[in-house]
Amino acid sequence: MSDKSPPREWFPALNELLVRDRDLDQLAPDRFEQDPDPEKAPLDLGSRHRVRVGKLARMFFKNGLREFGDWLTPRVLPARTEWPPTKLTFEVEKAALHVVLDWLKPVPEYPPYTKDDEKQELLGLRRNLLQLAEDRLANLSEPGAVGSTVPWEDDDDWETLPRLVRSLLRYMHPRKQARLDDLCRVVWEKDAADVTDSARNSAIHKANAFLAKRERRVLEKVRGEPVLRWT
């Protein structure tokens, strides 16, 4: 199935916000020398920016989105806008969008010595990213928006699987493991607390029954942890 949703404009918007934040950080040392204020003394060049970007990278890693985290971590200061993962599936993009939206929730931390008009500029970039991310997520959540993401779609019994089971397999296929909070938000479109153990276990059981003739691995809930993994 082809992707009929709008262009992925949210990713360049994220890059633009991070780059502008970095540029303002780089102005802080000179501004500090011109108007010293001990309470605004900047850290070494880019450190505060690395803290903010590092938080986003850690959130990507925590949610199994290693390609997104790797895109940020080596360079810290992104300078290009190409799409990081070479094979981006709908389910992976939805998970990434959830991470970005969570990252945008707290009150922004501005670089030191940021002027009022610059703060307004950053707020505008944040609002633009928020709107694009929300629109894209809503588009991907529409019925029929999920594209080809697994190697079993041509199998005769794929379409006979319940929709939730197919969505679960699509979500887990590119990952080694996933936190239930993130998985449930994508597969059931609910918080993990609102998905019963019975519903979750039923979907896992049906997925493993389907996989039995195709894979040497199965899905398993980690004992005592809110994590689903391949074993």
Image: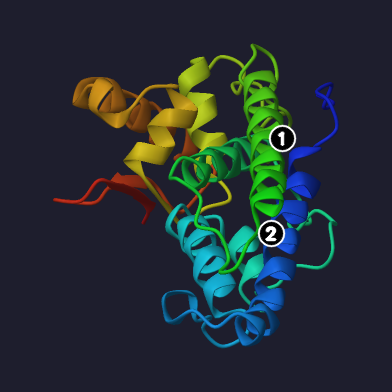
**Where is residue 3 drawn, in percent x and y?**
82, 27
For residue 26, the mark is none
Most foreground residue, 57 or 31: 31
Any part of residue 213 in sight: no
Any part of residue 139 in sight: yes
Label 2 sits on residue: 18
Marks 2/1: CA–CA distance: 13 Å
Image quarter of the N terminus:
top right
Label 1 sits on residue: 128
Give the SS element for disc 2.
helix
Which color scheme did the rendering employ for the protein? rainbow
**Where is residue 138 drawn, in percent x and y?**
63, 20
Question: At 52% from the left edge and 68% from the top edge, which residue is drawn?
Answer: 54
**Where is residue 120 drawn, in percent x and y?**
67, 44
Question: At 54% from the left edge and 26% from the top edge, which residue is drawn?
Answer: 166
Quadrant location of residue 145?
A: top right
Q: Is residue 133 above or below residue 160?
A: below
Q: Is residue 149 above or below residue 56?
A: above
* Mark found first going from the N terminus, 2 or 1: 2
Question: At 26% from the left edge and 21% from the top edge, which residue is drawn?
Answer: 194
Q: Is residue 182 above or below residue 145?
A: below
Q: Amino acid at mark 1?
A: Asn
Left or right, residue 72 beside residue 2: left
Question: At 66% from the left edge and 33% from the top edge, which residue is drawn?
Answer: 133
**Where is residue 66 drawn, in percent x and y?**
57, 62
Most foreground residue, 62 or 195: 62
Q: Is residue 229 above or below residue 71?
A: above
Most foreground residue, 37 or 136: 37
